[in-house]
Amino acid sequence: MRILFLITILSIFLIANEIKPTLTIYTYDSFTSPWGPAPKIKQAFEKDNNCTLKFIGISSSIGALRKIQLEGKKTKADILLGLDTSIAEVAKDTNLFIEHTLNITNLNLPIKYEDNIFVPFDYSYFAFVYNENNLKNIPHSFEDLINMPKNFKIVIQDPRSSTAGLGLLLWIKSIYGENASNYWKQLSPYILTITKGWSESYGLFLKGEADMVLSYTTSPAYHIIEENLTNIKASSFKNGHYGKIEVAAILKSSKQKVLAKKFLSFMHTKTFADIIPTSNWVYPVTNISNELKNPFKNLYKPSHMILTNGKIVQQNRKDIINEWLNAIQK
């Protein structure tokens, strides 16, 4: 009888685990890293929804989108997380995503945001980050960058594979307009290398191989809170700062649409918002339980966000990228 009882219990356990749904999310690699948001988000969401949450990290969010496009209807992804508003309209053209039907009108964003497919979950501002122990003459504008000493070097990301890289193109384009190509020609000698994604470029910067790296105004918070270091700074630019609003959407091919929608709603809970600031090192789009830690609150925050309309980006992205390629290759 005891053996029969144990077999019954074991069978119930196995059946319960077999029917537990799995929600799969494609995103960028730093999000899924041990120090990123994914582990804590996974634990919290699984606890409340009796499911398995699986994150798949790709080198960049654009890379994740391309992976989904290649996989087509056979993709394992239920959600794509981590694109920003600059590339979201391009993603819509793939016709791979469904409408979310959520109310996103009351989010804490620097600008008004409306979209029926992509749901925001965090935001920040692009900035050039430096180590004040190594760099004393700090550039505070794009003009300053091209007037630095010849041995001054920056690391940036490729706009074809990185939303940060695309953000820099749009930032410069918003300031220089038709003269953007000429600016890139002047900036090109100062570029040490162009990496596929943010993680590689930030790693090079931390190794001391470049004076500045394209990152975010919120990046110094990691070093302040986790390492007790205050020497990593984001330069405030007189030109203003281009914004990054990260978004997520549900795949049409998902077999877990109800659970996927629950996850999109979960992104606007205090539980999720509490995780984001000190794991993804950006601002959440909803209120958190407690005030942000002082080092985070005291970071430089631009007074307004520069952001090009997504449809304009969609229409001109290829031309802007080609303009950039032609400028830096000459």
Image (tube, helix red, strand yellow):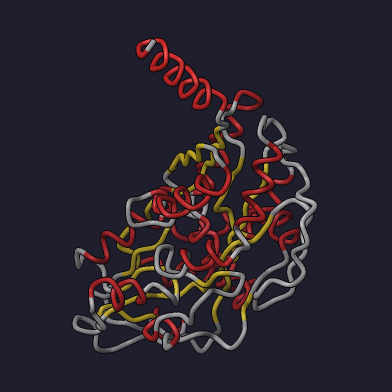
Percent from the top left, x then y, of residue 46? 51, 45
Name the one closer to the observer, 10 or 317.
10
The C terminus appears in which quarter of the rendering? bottom left
Relative to 210, 276 lies left or right: right
Using the rendered image of the protein, determine whether residue 28 is visible from the camera's viewpoint: yes
Name the one closer to the observer, 44 or 39.
44
Percent from the top left, x then y, of residue 224? 29, 78
The answer to whether residue 6 is above or below residue 120 is above
Percent from the top left, x then y, of residue 322? 57, 53
Which residue extends farthest front? 1
- The quadrant in which residue 307 appears is bottom right
The N terminus appears in which quarter of the rendering? top left
Name the one closer to the observer, 43 or 320.
43
Relative to 125, 34 lies left or right: left
The answer to whether residue 80 is above or below residue 103 is above
Q: Residue at x 58, y 27 (%)?
A: 71
Percent from the top left, x then y, of residue 266? 61, 56
Using the rendered image of the protein, determine whether residue 330 is visible from the camera's viewpoint: no
The number of callouts visible is 0
The answer to whether residue 185 is above or below residue 203 is below
The answer to whether residue 30 is above or below residue 111 is above
Q: Residue at x 49, y 27 (%)?
A: 17
Relative to 197, 259 lies left or right: right
- The quadrant in which residue 136 appears is bottom left
